[in-house]
Image: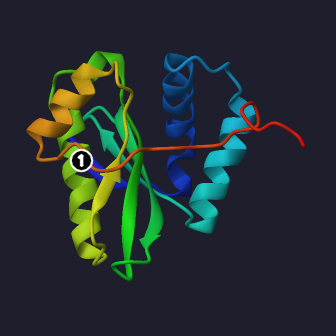
Amino acid sequence: MQITKANESHLELLIPAFETNRIHFGQTNDNLKTRRFLSERLTQNSSTIFIALADSGVLAGFTQLYPIFSTLKLESVWLLNDMFVMPDFRKGGVASLLVDAAWNHTKHTGAAWLTLKTGIENTKAQALYEKLGFRKDDEHFYYFLDNHSVKDA
């Protein structure tokens, strides 16, 4: 298994994996929109994507990181926004390798920390993240606004 930072040449490998991930989380298939989204991320360097490639060249999984910043620490932070292992490669250590790549990237770039969120019901992912050293934040709440929860005045 090889872990590498994705670039534009990996776009065709990434699209079906991202679509599989999106469908897994209840989104509808949209290859064209996914292509455009990924192409923008890669060409604009607005995210960092690590991919796991099996010896056969098949994409086994990916993780996508976004840069954010801590005003209090005056440092950068990486948000591990996406982590997905293709079904045929699960329970083979791929997720651990991808998290290792994300953590090494965090340290290499001098960021203060690596953060992520996962669903309350996703106990398998929680167990993995805790096994890899992540700690659950019991001191802060996570809030958000979206187009469906904002009421017009």
Q: Nearer the viewer, residue 106 or 88?
A: 106
Q: Percent position (x, y) of residue 5? A: 37, 57
Q: Percent position (x, y) of residue 51? A: 36, 45
Q: Nearer the viewer, residue 125 or 96?
A: 125
Residue drawn at (66%, 37%) of the image: 34
Q: Splitting the image into 4 quarters, where does residue 43 fall?
A: bottom right
Q: Splitting the image into 4 quarters, where does residue 48 fall?
A: bottom left
Q: Nearer the viewer, residue 116 or 71?
A: 71
- Residue at far right of view: 153
Residue type highlighted by circle 1: Val
Q: Percent position (x, y) of residue 99? A: 24, 47
Residue drawn at (52%, 44%) of the image: 143
Q: Splitting the image into 4 quarters, where does residue 57 fall?
A: top left
Query: Which quadrant of the rendered structure holds the C terminus?
Result: top right
Left/right placement of residue 4 relative to residue 146 reads left
Residue drawn at (39%, 27%) of the image: 119
Left/right placement of residue 2 relative to residue 29 reads left
Q: Percent position (x, y) of residue 36? A: 72, 46
User: Taking 133 as reference, is 76 above or below it?
Assistant: below
Exactly how many numbered labels are in the figure?
1
Q: Which residue is mark 1?
A: 99
User: Taking 130 as reference, is 133 above or below it?
Assistant: below
- Residue at far bottom of view: 74
Left/right placement of residue 37 relative to residue 123 reads right
Q: Looking at the image, what colour scheme do you see?
A: rainbow
Query: Which quadrant of the rendered structure holds the N terminus?
Result: top left
User: Taking 76 as reference, is 89 above or below it?
Assistant: above
The crowd level at tag 1 (other Cα within 10 Å; few <14, some 14-19, many 20+) is many
Left/right placement of residue 131 relative to residue 4 reads left
User: Taking 62 as reference, is 66 above or below it?
Assistant: below
Q: Secondary structure at mark 1?
A: helix
